[in-house]
Amino acid sequence: MGDPALAAKKDHGAAVAALLVLLVLLPGCNTLGMARRTFREPGPKLIDLPAKVALQHDCATRRLPYFVFEGQEVNPDRLIAGEEFNHRFVYALCPRKATEVVKGSLRTRIRYKDRIIVQDKDDGFELQPGRWAVDSFIRLPDDATLGIYSIEIDFKGRHVKFRHEATFGVDAP
């Protein structure tokens, strides 16, 4: 007769493995993307402390503040009118002083063709030292048209400026 605790651990591990396989194999679903979105909250999240970022980007030899836009994602990248999506961007900042922030204006726009259909502006946005992920959740209008859209982010601060965009698709219901 085996150890009951060991048997329970094996059963739990098998159940988790089966669930992961099921999530990956579900046809037509962006299940992993949904799971990722489910665990995200709006706002900034610290990923790495400033010391780690300073080593990775060799900030001791750079003009400070040193800023790097490390990427963004739209999740899901295909949706239907009225649905909500997650927009995340990641950046790294090496400040001049250990706890210094870079204040500025962050504008977010969603475009379809040449029209702005959603717009938001935060004039008090702060870029913070270290590596950060910033999440927002945006609901498309119920009357959004089938096609390709872009989300643009634009930041203007005293020492840092950036503009980036990503595209996503809106499908018929």
Image (cartoon, rainbow, N blue to C red):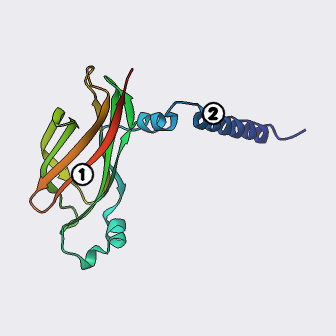
Instruction: Name the residue carrying label 1.
Output: 164
Say left or right for 36 vs 127.
right
Task: Bin the neighbour count of mark 1 within 10 Å (Cα to Cα): few under 14, some 14-19, many 20 and up.
Answer: some
- Residue 76 lies, with reference to residue 89, above or below; the image says above
Say left or right for 7 vs 93.
right
Name which residue type carries label 2: Leu
Give the position of the N terminus as an image quadrant.
top right
Residue 47 lies, in percent from the top left, at 37, 54
- Residue 54 lies, with reference to residue 6, above or below; the image says below
Q: Quadrant of residue 85?
A: top left
Name which residue type carries label 1: His
Residue 76 lies, in percent from the top left, at 40, 36
Residue at 21% x, 36% y is 113
Q: Nearer the viewer, residue 27 or 21?
A: 27
Element at badge 1? Answer: strand
Q: Nearer the viewer, residue 99 or 92?
A: 92
Q: Quadrant of residue 74?
A: top left
Element at badge 2? Answer: helix
Whether tag 2 and tag 1 are in contact, CB under 8 A, the answer is no
Residue 151 lies, in percent from the top left, at 25, 41
Residue at 23% x, 56% y is 128
Residue at 37% x, 67% y is 52
Give the position of the C terminus as an image quadrant.
top left
Q: Nearer the viewer, residue 68 or 55?
A: 68
**Residue 22 got which mark?**
2
Q: Quadrant of residue 65?
A: bottom left
Foreground tag (2 vs 1): 1
Q: Nearer the viewer, residue 112 or 26?
A: 112
